[in-house]
Each structure stands twice: as structure tokens, then as C-alpha cells.
Amino acid sequence: MLKILTRVYGKGSAIRPYVRTSAYIFRQCSNWESGIEKSVVTSKEFKNPFAQKTTTATENDHVESPALLSLNEKERRLKVLQLEVDIANQEGRRVPSLDFFNDEHWETVLTLPSKSARMKYYGFLWQVEMKKQAKQRKKEERAVATQERLDKLREERENNEHIIYGLGHVSMFLRIYDSTINHWMNHRLIRAMQFSPKLVLDCSYDEYMTKREAENAAKQLMLCFADNRSHDDPFDLHYCNVNLNTPCMQKLQRYIPTMLNIDFPMNVHQKCFTEIFPKENIVYLTPHCRTDLVEYNHDDVYVVGAMVDTVNNEPLSLAKAKRLGLRMARLPLDNYLQWGAGSGKSLTLNQMIKILLDLKQTGDWMTALRHVPRRKLLDTQMESDRTKRFLTKRANQFTVHLDRVMKEDESEERPNVRSHKKNMEFNLSTWGSKRKQNQRS
């Protein structure tokens, strides 16, 4: 260290105090490193003394951990390390400035066993500091560029004597912010709570779903709320039998953090829907029953089971409706749709909400069932094209077969060219003699 400083700064008297300070820091760091190296010889891998209050040692050795140092000794070492960092930073090394260090950084530096480890850590902190400075510099440059652009626009407006039309200028349109749209949709939901029909989502099937199914159910419940909120004539939507400790409801709270707020238009009940609405008005929609829903009744309260049953296909909603003594119905999907081969007839919760919303508004099943995914239905145009291609292929095969038969009939009518050899006797001695002669020649 002394030789390096002498080589860099020369032998002048002005740098002697700096050289003495550097030599002192070098000796102090070397002594401290040697003491730490002696303490870690007994263990092969380094252990953080801040994570463990006691360290392993033999009976004859006494290990002094930095965590167990006295306050004066710790302050002395911190001063030595601060001088080391300051000198390395002034020498132009990849070491951050002293202002960048905090208490956590110094505690980490105290646990490092050697100077090379400290320099690596200093290099890491220097990279972090450079990234922060670059980010701040870019931010200031963008602010300056934005201010220049605004000043230029302001100057152009002052020099222009004509009216400027467009966004941000004179316009006949009023700008509507996202917060205004949110307030308007929430107000529409509050109005629906007073005048619109009721729709219930039964959230009591968490114990029958796997973790993945519960997460999918939470996402579908969130989409149900969003689709109902964005509709022109929304339902008064109620989430019943809610247990906030289940995975489905915890995931739903991540999707809608304000769902339990008093001023948020979302009805969340821990009670059963039979305790909120009269039983004679409740209709449980389940695909396992045999009664079709013919038309929508605005006086009834329809209940949809909030369950994703990709694994468990048991008729749980049917059993619950029978146990509660409720009316049941299913959507008349088979009467209006042609299902494709291998496609399931199950629908998601948000698709059910969309179907019921359009059915309530129009009363037409064909309009309401347009929300069923097209991939589940039979494409009549594609099926007709496939049938046409199949018939064309079969006709071509029949034509080729018929041509082959006609050719065989024509060949039978022709005279046989080798018919004069039919009555000739076979002579083994002369057979193949002409072929052998041709090969020799």
C-alpha cells in the first residue's frame, strides 16, 4: 500500500500524512484479517455471526466473533473500515461513496473474513449506486426534455392567432377520466341493489375443489363481478356462504382488495341464501337436473353454484338443492345448440352470468346462448364441407375402380400373343441356354 501511494503521488512532503494514514489503515486491516482468519480456520465454511450467537471452537482455542465484540472495539473497526472505503473511493476504485452506506451495509462488512471479500462486496454496492445514479440522471433528462417541449408548445400557442382544435385544445368533447367511469359503474350497481332482480353465487364448495380449481373459481368469480358491473342492466349480485379463510376467497381478495369495504357495491354474506331470500322464490340452476328453464322470471332468485369441477363431477349442487327443498332448473342447451364431438357441455361461472344477463334483457335464448364458446359447438359449414369432400373422394375411388374393371374386360377380348406356346413341352436341358449365350456374348 505504501509503495503504491509513493509511486502514484511521489515522495513529496505534502502527501506524507496521507501515506502514513494509508499505511496505518493497511496494518489495521491486515491485523484484523489475520485475527478473523485464525478464528475461521477450525471451520471449513464461513458462518454469519449475526445469524448465530455462538460459534464452534476447540477446547484450547478462543474464538472472538464480531457479534460478541465490545462497543468500543466495534466502533474502532468501523472507523478503520470507513477510512478504507474513503481512500479506495478517492483512488478511483469500484467502491461506493461513504454516503451510500447504511447500518445494514456496515454490519455485513463486519462479518466478511478477508479484504478480497470486502472488495467484492464494495464492487456490488458500487454497481447498485451507479444504477441508481443512472436512473436518476435519466429521470432528470426526461424532465428537462418534457419541460422544453411544453415551453415550445406554449410559445407556439402564444404566437398562433387562430383557434387550435383537438385533444388538449378547444374541443366539443368532454374528457372522461377512468375514475369517473368507475364511479358511474359503482352508482349503477347501487341502483341495481334497489331495483334489479337478485342473483346468488353459492360459495360453499371449497372443500370439494383442489387448490388449482379454487384459484380458477376465484378468477371466475372476479370475472362475474366485472361482467355484471359493465352490463347495461346488471343484477343485484350476492356472494353467499362465504368463508374468508378458504383459498378461493383469499385469492378473490387479492383480485378485488376493496371487496369488504362498506362503500364498495359488492354483497358478501357468510349466511346461506335461504336465510336472506324466501325459499319459494329460489331456483337453483344445476346441470344435473331434468327440468329445463323455459323462460326467465324476474321475480325468482336464481342461484349458481360457484364450483369448478374438472376433477370432481359428482352432482353436488343437485344434492344440495334437494336437501334444502328448492326448485331446480337447467339451461336448455340441447334444444338450441349442436355440440361437437368430444366437447364437454360445462360452462364457466362468468359465461353463466353473461347468458342470464342477456336472457333477462332480451328473453331470447338464441341471443343469450351466443356466449357459449364456438369451439364446443358443431360447425355446420365445416361439417358440410367435410361431408362433401368425403363423398367426392368416394366417387373418385368408384370411378377409378370402374375404369380398372373396363380395362380388364378389354384385355380379355384381345387375342393372346403367346397362345402358340401353350402346348409346347418343357425341356430342362435346353431351358435358359439362349439366356446364357446372350450373357457370354
Image (cartoon, rainbow, N blue to C red):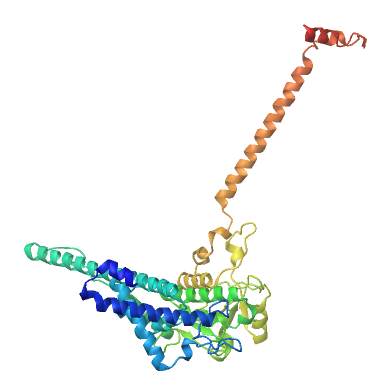
The residue under the point 77% across, 13% down is 414
> Which is more toward the observer, 129 or 310?
129
The residue under the point 62% across, 45% down is 387
Residue 347 percent across, percent down from the top left = 57, 68
The residue under the point 60% across, 45% down is 386
User: In the rendered view, would you say 184 is above or below 169?
Assistant: below
User: In the rendered view, would you say 123 is above or below 101?
Assistant: above
The residue under the point 30% across, 70% down is 5
> Which is more toward the observer, 279 or 172?
172
Residue 205 percent across, percent down from the top left = 61, 81
Evaluate whether residue 101 shows in this view: no
> How many numbered dots are placed on residues in this image?
0
Residue 293 percent across, percent down from the top left = 58, 73
Evaluate whether residue 85 shows in this view: yes
Residue 71 percent across, percent down from the top left = 41, 93
Q: Which quarter of the image is occupied by the C terminus?
A: top right
Q: Which quarter of the image is occupied by the N terminus?
A: bottom left
> Which is more toward the observer, 291 or 184?
184
Name the image quarter holding residue 58.
bottom right
> Which is more toward the observer, 55 or 168?
55
Q: Is residue 148 left or right of residue 199?
A: left
Q: Is residue 349 left or right of residue 93?
A: right
User: In the rendered view, would you say 162 is above or below 399?
Assistant: below
